[in-house]
Image (cartoon, grey):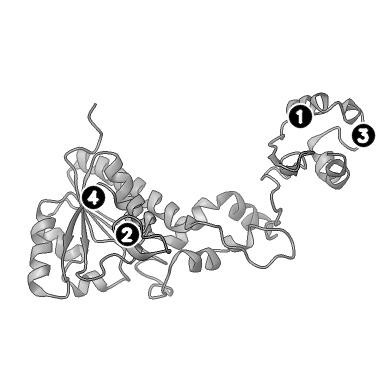
Amino acid sequence: MSRPLEGIRVADFSHVMAGPFATHLLRLLGAEVIKIEAPGRGDALRYYGSDRRYDGMAPAFIGVNAGKKSVVLNLKKPKAQEAARRLIETSDVLVENFRPGVMARFGLDYETVRKIRPDIIYCSISGYGQSGPRRDWPAIDNIVQATSGMMTLGGSDGDEPMRVGFPVVDTLTGQTAAFAILAALFRRQREGEGEYIDVAMFDASLAFMTSAVVPYLVTGRPPERTGNVGYSGQPTSALFEAADGRQISLGVVQQSQFEELARELGCERWLTDERFLTPDLRRRNSQALRAEL
């Protein structure tokens, strides 16, 4: 079976995680991805962590770069810049995640590239966008987890800000970029035009936190930190320790689910307890219900 992006070539000038994850998704859909790295060390993600069992490469690097083709170019050199332009002539998509302005110094900015390939889909990924007051701020995953407020959503009240335990911002930014590239390819198929795409890690983070951000914008109240309790706030949607010492995660949110849980646990008395009759009452009396659980 053919894959949807077969015949699409991607010139991948990105490094570490957000950009490479975007091009990884495109490769999974059938695109030919040609990864450009600097001579010597190459992509810094090659050396993340302490595990080097795969020919000296970090597993995380392999996870988002397997199946890509590789080219080494020192983009500070004119001959390498010319080689990059020849590659771009035959590419449908270009992805880069340098700091704003770096590709222009290489002579590979969008305005220059579109003269080489007018219908190119050019995607720039950065921390805070290609314009605006934070344009030149440095950004990696954990920094944007902090500046976006993401670190204040996990954990419980009184905890220090808490980082999500994997590069979630890089990952969701890569997903956002890949989604935008697919939309631009679809538009090009219909209208024959290229596209410039500006993806910011900060913007992507806020979009993915819509369920927390929008209530804050409406009410002005910061989101509660609820630990392992589910988004519904129901005391029966959380992590519990079972009698054998193992942990169990419950997602009992709807009224019918609560009634079934009560019957399964032999706690039919909950069904007539005025404190637990409705979801709102159970939230209001969550400590009492959790004590019984």
Other residues around mark 1 within 10 Å, as few (<14) / some (14–19) / many (≥20): few
What residue lies at 46% left-to-right and 63% top-to-bottom?
141
Q: Is residue 254 left or right of residue 168?
A: right
Question: Which circle's residue, 3 or 2, is located before the other in the chain?
Answer: 2
Dot 1: what SS?
helix
SS class of the residue under badge 2?
A: loop
Q: At 8% from the left edge and 66% from the top edge, which residue is drawn? A: 82
Q: Mark 3 to mark 2: distance in Å? A: 60 Å
Tell me, for residue 255, which label it has, or none.
1
| CA neighbours of label 4 inside 10 A, class few (<14), some (14 to 19), many (20+) | some
Three-letter amino acid code of the residue under disc 4: Lys
Q: Secondary structure at mark 3?
A: loop
Give the residue pinned by disc 2: 57
Q: CA distance from mark 4 to mark 1?
A: 49 Å
Q: Report the disc number at residue 60.
A: none
Q: Which residue is mark 3?
A: 274
Figure quadrant of the C terminus: top right
Marks 4/3: CA–CA distance = 61 Å
Give the percent coordinates (x, y) of residue 28. Answer: 30, 41
